[in-house]
Amino acid sequence: MIPILDIDGYTLEYRTRAGAVRVLDEVSLQIAPGQVLGLVGESGSGKSSLAWAVMRHLPGNAQELSGAIRLDGEDLRSMGARQLEAVRGRRIGMVFQDPATSLNPTLSLGRQVAEVLARHRGMSAAAAWQAGIEALRHVDLRDPAALMRRYPHEVSGGEKQRVIIATAFACRPELIIFDEPTTALDVITGARILELFRRLREETGVAGLYISHDLALVSRVAERVAVIRRGQVVEQADARRIFRAPTHDYTRALVQAVPRPERRLVTDGPGGPTVLAARGLGVAYGRARLFGGKPVMGARGVDLELRRGEILGVVGESGSGKSTLARAFSGLARFTGAVVFEGRALASPRQMDRAYRRAVQIVFQHPDASLNPRHRVGALLARPLRLYGGAMAELPRLLEQVRLPPDYARRYPHQLSGGEKQRVAIARAFAAKPALVICDEITAPLDVSVQAAVVELLLELRRRHGTAYLFITHDLSLVRQIAHRIAVMRRGELVDLLSVDALGSEAVHPYTRELIAASPTPVG
Amino acid sequence: MSASWLIRRILLIAYTLLVVSLLVFGITQVLPADAAVMLLGENATPAALAAVRAKLGLGDPAWLQYWHWLAALLRGDFGMSMRTGQPVGPTMLVALSRSLLLAALALALMLVFAVPLGLAAALRRGKPIDLAAGIVSYLGVSLPEFVTATLLLLLLADRLHWLPATGYVPLTDNPVDGLRHLGLPVLTVSLVLIAHVSRMVRSETIDVLHSDYIRAARLKGLSPRRVLFGHAVRNALLPVITIVALDVGYLLGGIIVVEEIFAIPGIGRQLIVAIESRDLPAIQAGALIMAATYAIANFLADIAYALLDKRIRYD
């Protein structure tokens, strides 16, 4: 049987000023008809480059050194521009990582679906529009006829991704390439997209190349999994086997790094007095206006407290108010209700004095945005030391604490890797000797292996200093490994606040149950 | 675009013009010109001067004079020219219509050349056409219009005799000759605009062509032509609208110089004549009309933006 996609000894380099960089090295992969192959790798592993190579959409500095890419036996590399246009969108569909940027903001959704049908199936504009409505109906979008006339900014992220999937499936392709299609979506929305993909697969028997950094997720959608590292496929195996019996060291490390709820990393309970509490905390964004329009509630009526050394996980989908909570606690947002600190009830950010700001530190999601690119690491860390009366001599110790060599003080943020930058941000938070550190999605931009190391570092710092964490994340599996209690937020409200052991019980909110069901856990 | 937004926007324009009227009035107050002397000449008797001052209310406090002037403005009365004794309003409006014709032709010429030039440069980035367009643009932006005007005059009128050098022929008298006389001024003004806008189109197009949704459109199998005209151009031209609206400000300033050089009796030339002869009502009227033109141009640009980009909603 001829494979649908046959990549044979493919080697790709990018020419850069610093010389040639090999991104794919003798890669060989086959996808049989109806089969889905998962391609797993960390950032920079070359997994996306492989997708661009298959789509024949490589940047100008790409140099293909060897190998063949065949679609159903036909060599894609030797095809001309015209032939490729007839393959793209017709025989190979693609679903992209970020639905928000992959749709043209100034064209209606209908036009963006219908144009593929008009292009590849020779339909008239009216017929393509009708077929577009059907295509949207097929991906479970409600009221597709009305949706066709709407614009991307008027629909949710999940709906956008469904429109893109409808477009990819519209011309009955032989192969679909998924490039991290759920990464930019909420856990629950992502889980529904995966369900949709499973159903469409069964109905159409399409073959798929599913690219992701998430080994647990890939092992659930693909039959076979290939692990790619620095441009080389290090292991290829049955999806069920790769988790149970990884053979390559790198795969083993990846499997190890996948958070598993049943493997607790924190064993001791919280002890001592309450560090910080919220009483009826609410945050409103915007303001009431003369001509209609009510302020949007980012959070309302939140009651919780953190004790010394406690890790409180805060989960919920985007827009649920997780980060709003962080902004209120760190004094970045005006709030109603009260924040209780050392027995004092603070009613506004202005009442948060130096002692409070010292005790409550925050680490943000994107170190690139939170570390000033024009300052050296040393200057970044010296600022809180000066502010809170630390000695400059502590600098090397601060770096050593986050396992960075002391000479990193002379470096600029752009000279560090993503994980190292986040370590610097953590060191900066700990320079103030805080009682509580708010971690706002700090592992989200990191690869799994780096994430595991950063989490381990946080736990070690907690052991040493007894620090409490407000750990905000969308990764339920991760938070179940480390948190003592879990707060579940939804639409600005705290729907559940319970001990991590109670998650499986009957008493949990239906939404919490939905979140648990949507979290990808590895098979096998 | 809601009705309430439109109303608020129009009120804002009215408010802007009120502020401008205060400024204009204030400036003409401090100008070293005595209206009575202007009217009667240097050799008038003190008694005659005093009589005229009393009649014009020049002895009144400034705020009362402003109030009288504003009240007359609202009735559409810009006052009488001190130079010609004719009503200022009609004269200025006729001049404005000539300037607007010049500006409209320059904008049209700009659109015809700047958009394709910018697109071509973006698509052939780093190629000869991009470099050539870049050089022409920098020249166009950096040369003041009196220099380009002179160069064009020397080349097209003096050397080649393609276009008449100066003068104005109303289109109603002789359309062909009228357009020929507008040729050099339109070219001069539009050259700067073309330079400016084509650069803008180029950089916006390059940005848009690197966006995810253009990549997605290509990977749908759309032809390069469809990707460019169906997906990219519209988004690339959106910011250009704002730039063109801002350029109207330049246009008004640039037109003053160009009208003077080519002897076109437009609003710019009228304003210069008014300033030279200390014709206060004419100065006030000219300045106000220019401010109103600018405010309205920006208003129209906002509306055009909302019509083209559905994400923009004014409410």
Image (spheres, helix red, strand yellow):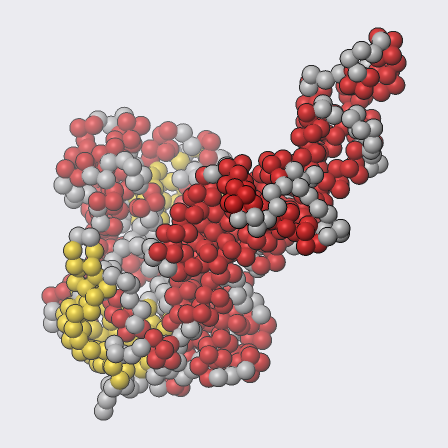
Q: Position of residue A256 (x, y in %)?
A: 18, 63
Instruction: Report if residue A173 is visible in the image.
Output: yes
Left or right for A141, reference A201: right
Q: Looking at the image, which is closer to me, B213 or A397?
A: B213
- Say which quarter of the image contains residue B188: top right
Point out the residue furthest to the bottom here.
A1
The residue at the point 51 percent across, 76 percent down is: A114
Q: Looking at the image, which is closer to me, A450 or A271?
A: A450
Q: Looking at the image, which is closer to me, A341 or B19?
A: B19
Q: Looking at the image, which is closer to me, B169 or B224?
A: B169
Q: Position of residue A157 (x, y in %)?
A: 46, 64
Left or right for B123, reference B83: left
Point out the residue furthest to the top here.
B46
- Say which quarter of the image contains residue B252: top right
Numbered disc total: 0
Left or right for A496, reference B242: left
Q: Classify B253 as above or below A176.
A: above
Q: Classify A347 as above or below B112.
A: above
The residue at the point 54 percent across, 67 percent down is: A108
The residue at the point 45 percent across, 65 percent down is: B228
- Say which quarter of the image contains residue A449: bottom left
Q: Position of residue A516 (x, y in %)?
A: 37, 66
Q: Position of residue A259 (x, y in %)?
A: 25, 61
The quadrant of the image that shows the C terminus of chain A is bottom left
